[in-house]
Image: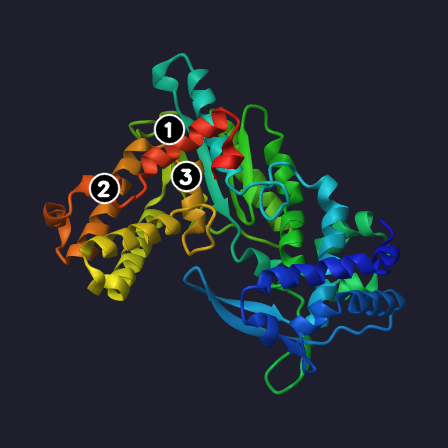
Amino acid sequence: MDVGTCLADRRRYERQIERLHQRHLMTSRLYELRQDDVSLASIVLHRARVARLLARDVSSGAYALQPGELRTIKARNKLREVYSCRLTDLIVHGVVADLVREAVAPTLSPRVFSYRKGTSWTAPIAQFAAWVRATRAAQPDVRERGVYVLRCDVDSYTDSIPLGPSSPLWAMLGPHLGYPLHPVVHEVIKTTMRVPGGAVASRDLGLPMGQPIAPVLANLYLGELDAALAAVPGGFYARYGDDFLFAHPDPAAVCAGIATTDAVLARLALTANERKRQVVYLTPPGRPSDGWPAARGAPAVQFLGTRVDATGTIGLDHPKVRAVLREVDRRSAATVRTVGRRGREEAGRAVCAVVNRALDPRGQLTQQRSAILLRRVVTDRAQLRQLDHRIAQIVASAVTGRAGPRAFREVPYRTLREEWGLVSLVAARNACRSSRTNGTFGRTY
């Protein structure tokens, strides 16, 4: 790849401006994000001229990236530090990220599912469940129907990747982007930032989280581990970010996989998160392994927000179930407060409509990822039926003010479904499966 030529292509900058436009189109950020009193809306309006000027200055070396700032945000109930920069720098960061993504894409393992265009984050869940079913069917002795599973993630992965001169990252990028690495690419990866007191510092450890280059490099950096574990015959391997799963019916293969994992991570100056590392012997009764007592017997294993059991059935894990029910309860209560005085039936219809939208995988609401799992991935009909009942009870309680099953005395379950239109998760999942079988999946959802 000729990086210099690509950086001179104004179309790449226009695409980044349009992405920012689409991201903030329906928010006030379109006007609040500013640089030198110029808003993002103004940059979008004059995108062709801005792109042409950026392409000219970046390719000629006249453009200088400015130091960014570290900000602390709360994401998924955790405090995280993210790197923020001015608008034109953000556009340049996006262009460089796309260049690196295009360059390294052919070498990425197909077993890496994170932040890749055209690759669904739900795919490894369904693939693992299918592998469990196939492996179970291939074991004729019922007593031997079990698989060994290594669940692991890297301790503080993106914050631990070294960026100093001796970092393995530079050797990984060189063959794809050329030697020496283009200065703009180097600057985007090894960002500078302002620290308290106004000084400017450059980090030798940790990717610039919050910038588009971070997930690209996170996919690349564990390439050696991906290749090693994916090549084990008869096994299953999948990685999403720093979270990976390796499974095999032979305990010796999983034991060797653990040794390989530790060796590769050590070479990359990383460590496994021992608190989250699990070695499980997966069987329907959850019995312990005779061949490897160190493997904990379990009837199911958690993976990417789901619970895959020893028969290959997929359900939501407990944290996801609790989050879905909390969100339904919150939205139901808020809707009743808004329309409660208009009568029970109108309030009930409004609450059911709000809950239906919250569980629609096409929506942009808080529980969208869980909604996608419930509608397209979860195969545990027993769990779906339980959720149907609990969600209906939450709605009935919100409308009647009566807690627990007593709410159904005033608002029958059938009324919620047939008159007020509350969607059944079981019925929706069955309809989704039927539409996929008939080739109409895209038109249904």
Q: Quadrant of residue 287?
A: top left
Q: CA separation, marks 2 and 1? A: 26 Å
Q: Are marks 2 and 3 in contact (CB under 8 Å)?
A: no
Mark 2 vs 3, N-terminal side:
3
Q: CA separation, marks 2 and 3? A: 16 Å
Q: Is residue 35 above or below residue 197?
A: above
Q: CA separation, marks 3 and 1? A: 21 Å
Residue 128, horizontal then vertical, whole percent? 48, 32
Task: Residue at the far bottom: name it.
Answer: 197
Residue for badge 2: 389
Q: Nearer the viewer, residue 28 or 377?
A: 28
**Amino acid bearing label 3:** Arg
> Disc number at residue 310?
1
Residue drawn at (71%, 60%) of the image: 16
**Amino acid bearing label 1:** Ala
Q: Nearer the viewer, residue 12 or 190?
A: 12
